[in-house]
Amino acid sequence: MTVEVLTLCDFAQDMMGKLTVVGCFDAVTVRDFPATHPLLCVAARIRFPVYELGAHQVSVDITDADGAQLVPPLKGELNVNGIGGDSACANMTLNLFNLRLEHEGSWRVSLAIDGQERAHIPLFVRRPPAGRQTH
């Protein structure tokens, strides 16, 4: 399998096999800690060759450098079906509402499929530079 897309964004939706992703980012800027981020979406598009069609266990972990989790592991199952062709794609979207951010730092957003990490991306949480406002 190949992870074609793994991103953090403002909005993600799977509609009949089409993945819509709006506002990709890798950093959240907050004025004070603790802070609450109203909505953080994780979007993924994964391509499976025909010999890997079927059910797959999926998990997303968000951890800091010390292994502390930002949220409990998010686990689920993808059921990948293909019609013709030599591969099929599955889209995955996760919406994290009111995400509590306790401190500034870097996190690793990891996507595992069938117990094996397949991709990861960073999430940076930081204060704005001196004299600048948050957006």
Image (spheres, helix red, strand yellow):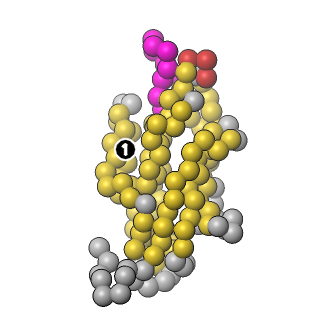
Give percent across and percent down for residue 82.
49, 19
Element class at badge 1: strand
Q: Is residue 75 above or below residue 69?
A: above
x 51%, y 73%: residue: 100
Q: Count residues near mark 1 (Cα–Cα under 10 Å), then give few for <14, some for 14-19, many for 20+.
A: some
Residue for badge 1: 13
x 48%, y 67%: residue: 124
Q: Does residue 129 appear in this view?
A: yes
x 47%, y 28%: residue: 89
What type is the residue that disc 1 sits on? Gln
Q: Can you name the residue that lies furthest to the front here? A: 130
Q: Can you name the residue that lies furthest to the top here? A: 84
Q: Quadrant of the N terminus?
A: top right
Q: Is residue 27 magenta?
A: no
Q: Is residue 85 magenta?
A: yes
Q: Quadrant of the C terminus?
A: bottom left
| Picture quadrant of residue 25 | bottom left
Q: Is residue 110 above or below residue 113?
A: below
x 50%, y 29%: residue: 47
For the stretch drawn in magenta, the main secondary structure is loop
Q: Is residue 133 left or right of residue 105?
A: left
Give percent across and percent down for residue 131.
30, 88
Give percent across and percent down for residue 68.
67, 68
Q: Is residue 55 left or right of residue 128?
A: right
Magenta stretch, residue numbers: 81-90
